[in-house]
Image (cartoon, helix red, strand yellow):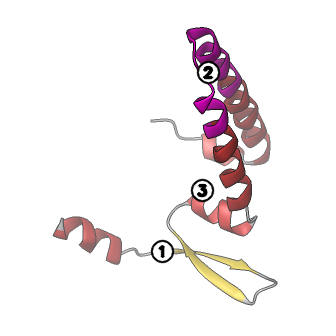
Amino acid sequence: MAIADKKKSNKKNPLYVVTNEGKDVETAESIWDAVVKKFNLQPVIDLFMVLVELIAKQINSYAALAWLNEELTKFNDELDRLLKKVAPWLYFYHV
């Protein structure tokens, strides 16, 4: 546990996000966190999660689960396609 804390505190190049026309500066944990903070996407993400939770609570059959899985896969594919156009550098390295 101490090693993980030491690695976190020894970041050489922390990310910072400047918002509110340069008035606010926030640290970001990752590139995704920086994008979410820069474009203020957290309310959109929260709304999407609430909608998915509401739909998931209504599932009472395998057919409904398969439909939800298919729709979430379509959403993921569209988001992936959009990100490849907007930020192709994110897809340079694959694990």
Q: Main secondary structure of the magenta part?
A: helix
Q: Which mark is residue 95?
A: none
Residue 12, how many percent across, how many down? 41, 75
Q: Which residue is mark 2?
A: 69
Q: CA distance from mark 1 to mark 2?
A: 38 Å
Farthest residue to the bottom: give it.
23
How many other residues sit within 10 Å of disc 1, few (<14), some (14-19) or many (≥20)? few
Mark sitting earlier along the chain (1/3): 1
Residue 72, how many percent across, how many down? 66, 28
Q: Which residue is mark 3?
A: 32
Residue 15 higher or lower than 33, as above or below = below
Q: Nearer the viewer, residue 64 or 36?
A: 64
Check if mark 1's residue and mark 2's residue have beta carbons within 8 Å. Answer: no
Badge 1 marks a residue whose secondary structure is: loop
Mark sitting earlier along the chain (1/2): 1
Q: CA distance from mark 1 to mark 3?
A: 16 Å
Mark sitting earlier along the chain (3/2): 3
Residue occupying the point 73% across, 42% down: 83
Q: Nearer the viewer, residue 39 or 49?
A: 49
Residue 6, how many percent across, how many down? 25, 73
User: Which of the two discs, 1 and 3, sits closer to the camera?
Assistant: 3
Image quadrant holding the C terminus, namely top left
Q: Nearer the viewer, residue 49 or 94?
A: 49
The span shown in magenta is 53-72
Image quadrant holding the N terminus, namely bottom left
User: Which of the two discs, 1 and 2, sits closer to the camera?
Assistant: 2
Residue occupying the point 69% across, 86% down: 24
How many other residues sit within 10 Å of disc 3, few (<14), some (14-19) or many (≥20)? few
Residue occupying the point 62% across, 46% down: 90
Q: Which residue is mark 1?
A: 13
